[in-house]
Image: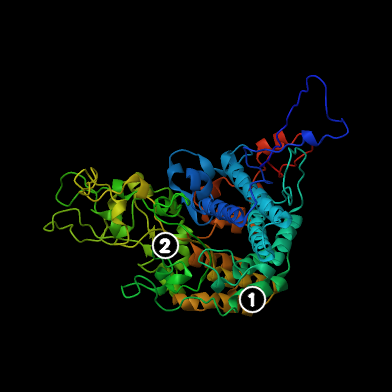
Amino acid sequence: MYKILKKAVLVIAIGSIAFSCQNADFLDEKPLDIYTPTNSLSKSSDFQASINFLHSRIREIYTRGSGNLDACWAMKYATDFAVNVTDYYTPLKLNDYNNTMTSNFQVPSSFWSWGYEIIVNSNNVIDGATASTTLSDAEKKSFTAQAKFTRAWAYRMLANLFGGVPLVTTQITEAKRDYTRATRAAVYEQCRKDLAEAIVDLPNIDAVKDGKINKQAAQHLLSEIYICLNKPDEAIAAASAVISYPGVALMTTRFGRHKDQPGDVYRDLFELNNQNRTSGNKEGLFVLQQDFLNPANGNWDSNSDGFMPNVEALTFVPTGGGSAVPPMKVWNEKIGGRGFGWIRPTVHFLDEIWQGPDFANDMRNSKYNIIRDFQIDNVPSSSPDYGKWYVADGYAAKQPDGVNKIRNWYPIIKKATLSEGDFLPEQYAKDANGNIKTSPVNGGKLLIKASEQVYHEVYSIRLAETYLLRAEANVMKGDKAAAAADINALRRRAGSADILAANVTIDAILDERLRELYGEELRMLTLTRMGLLYDRNVRYNEKSGLTIKPIHNLWPIPFSEIERNVGAKLEQNPGYN
């Protein structure tokens, strides 16, 4: 857990002492050359820099900042949504829950550290703003409200993953090693209190710049917290306040940079530069900002190269014989960038949730959003293979078992990457003469290492999820008709058939979340919040479902935190001792 240690100073007096022992002011530390919570937050720009830092820490959790791939990707694979493809050959990481999810595993430790880093720095802003003599009253309210939102965001994440955790709501000024766990309900109650107070002073979404914390984002998060507190009426009211606000709306008509090209409005939501309100998008509620070559954001996107299959290494033998070659050239732009093939969606997501006539025309599964096939073009145009479809014409089925079938090809989640023509010229490696280098593997354009990722904004909260939270709360309340109406608002936008009220269950809502929020939702947080990580993995994850146990509905408290907490007992979650 983050600790801010107070520096100790030893003063040795030689000769006569001119100070009374009763006047020990001279012993008070006044650091002149280091930053502390007291001296680092003095003016408005200091507080704004701290808020910016809190944004960056949340973005890091979504976008594998600092290169912590295992931790960030764990939010999506090892759930009912996806598996870790690299673990097909060795039983490592969360494809093998039983042997990997221990109190020494770095993934829980990473999220524990991220959570408390956000919390401690939020506390610094809140306490600093309260004590400030330089901020205006309006600035105090604004910075405090934003920091209470980020503190609630972090405590909600920790409570979802670990259950009850230590509550720290004031600035830490000295070493502390006697933390105890609050109950999970108490942590959620702190989130409720923070959000309710923040909502009073946060501006509406259409009154702030893109990406800033706003009232509607806080109301959305408050709705989820009320669900966690088993207060469905309050959850419905919070979600309804968002949905009914005139400045937000589900996007139902084409918009943005490619609106005049073949596609659909669901694809428009994820095109480059289409996430923010400046594009006309009224659906994004809390959008994490990310720009090409901006060192402040780290330029990482967890959805891009990890979700992309490793097409660069895919090969086939042309009809008539000859050497094996990749079936596609210049694949970078055609299907969306370089792929590593680390996150492969489950069969449940790729096939089962789209089955039946209800979803035959669902645009969320259209060719513009999930690429399930491509045309072979890395052979001469006279070849009988040229222009054939890799999957539909049987080439994929001919591949022997192994990497080609497991990691090098599977349907591509298009929202995770860019459309053809949207990569910047700076994202290609060039020789000394400025010519684009060719790949030794496939003869196509080679993306430089720094541009293997996709640089576009990332949704943390989107209005579509608010509808699904309200549907969940209505199921809790027993009003399936109201829940169906919310689900159908999304289905009608997508072009699929309505769900009948009698068929609305929590399972149905989880499947609808997969259809609507796939690849963007931190799925692990949803399933641990509901206590359904075990159940959904056993049923739908072909790898981790083989080893997961009920205890894994909560993650283990990191052993390092228990070990250093010598002043009190930090209880471990059941089953991990």
What is the CA distance from the residue labelled 2 to the residue labelled 1? 28 Å
Q: Residue at x 33, y 47 (%)?
A: 404
Is 167 drawn above or below residue 576 in the view shown?
below
Q: Is residue 326 left or right of residue 468?
A: left
Is 518 drawn above or below residue 16 in the view shown?
below
Residue 346 in percent (x, y) is at 47, 56
Amino acid marked by disc 1: Ala
| Name of the residue lying farthest toward the left | 382
Relative to the observer, which residue lies in front, 76 or 356? Answer: 76
- Residue 464, can we see it? yes
Q: Is residue 538 left or right of residue 27?
A: left
Residue 241 in percent (x, y) is at 64, 76
Mark 1, Cα crowd under 10 Å, few <14 / some 14-19 / many 20+, is some
Q: Residue at x 13, y 55 (%)?
A: 380
Residue 190 in percent (x, y) is at 73, 58
Q: Residue at x 64, y 69 (%)?
A: 219
| Residue occupied by mark 2 | 415
Which quadrant is the C terminus positioned in? top right
Residue 543 in percent (x, y) is at 50, 48
Element at label 2: helix
Which quadrant is the N terminus positioned in? top right
Q: Which circle, 2 or 1, is nearer the viewer?
A: 1
| Residue occupied by mark 1 | 241
Element at label 1: helix
Q: Residue at x 67, y 72 (%)?
A: 238
| Name of the residue lying farthest toward the top | 15
Quadrant of residue 132 in the image? bottom right
